[in-house]
Amino acid sequence: MTSSYGLYRRLHGRPLGQRAFSLGYMLKAPYFASVRPQVREMAPHRGVVSIRKRRAVQNHIGTIHAIAVANGLEAAMGLLCEATTPKGMRWIPKGIRLDYLAKVPSDVECIAQTDPADWDREPPFQVDVRCTARVEGGTEVVSGVIPVWVTLAS
């Protein structure tokens, strides 16, 4: 278990625990601060963050910018990888492939998922993290994959 996943487990369920963890996550990876992801779930094979619609993440037509959603999906993927990567291994994203399916007119939930079999290999290997973003009501607005390269830690 990574130190970040251990911290999440200690804070989860405590008053202001998820808010404190979300803030710490932005401090650890400062580029996430632009979208202010609120960590909703961090578990093996699943990471979930939400992004609130606010002026700083809007585009010229008043919807959440596609790249802001991509940033949220990468944040969710990072949570998943931190909670899933076996001890003695490390991970790094290799790219991102997303399809923008619809405008994002409201707050958005960014979800990253894998299956246990995706990680049951000898390193080095690639895991394709499935990503989806949904608005209130469940409408899918972004779908894609973030390939992650997993190697032995040196």
Image: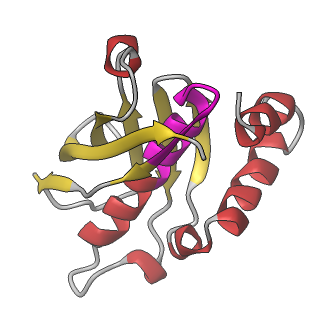
Q: In which quarter of the image is residue 112?
A: top left
- The residue at the far bottom in this view is 60
Q: Residue at x 35, y 44 (%)?
A: 149
Eyeballing the image, is 65 above or below 100? below
Q: Nearer the viewer, residue 130 or 121?
A: 121
Eyeballing the image, is 126 above or below 146? above
Q: Is residue 71 left or right of residue 153?
A: left
Q: Is residue 83 left or right of residue 54?
A: right
**Where is residue 82 drawn, in percent x and y?**
59, 38
* Residue 146 in view, yes or no: yes
Q: Which of 17 and 7 is in front in this view?
A: 7
**Where is residue 106 drawn, in percent x and y?**
36, 58
**Is residue 84 found inside the magenta-colored segment of the image?**
yes
Total of numbered circles in the picture?
A: 0
Q: Residue at x 35, y 25 (%)?
A: 114
**Where is residue 27 drawn, in percent x and y?**
72, 68
Q: Which residue is drawn at 71% across and 35% down?
A: 2
* Residue 134 in view, yes or no: no
Q: In which quarter of the image is the N terminus?
A: top right
Q: Nearer the viewer, residue 92 or 101?
A: 92
Q: Quadrant of residue 42?
A: top right
Query: What kind of colouring is applied to the model shown?
Result: secondary structure
Q: What stretch is highlighted in magenta?
A: 75-91
Eyeballing the image, is 49 above or below 115? below
**Where is residue 107 drawn, in percent x and y?**
42, 55
Q: Which residue is drawn at 61% across and 66% down?
A: 29
Q: In this view, does 141 lie to the left or right of 81?
A: left
Q: In which quarter of the image is residue 30?
A: bottom right
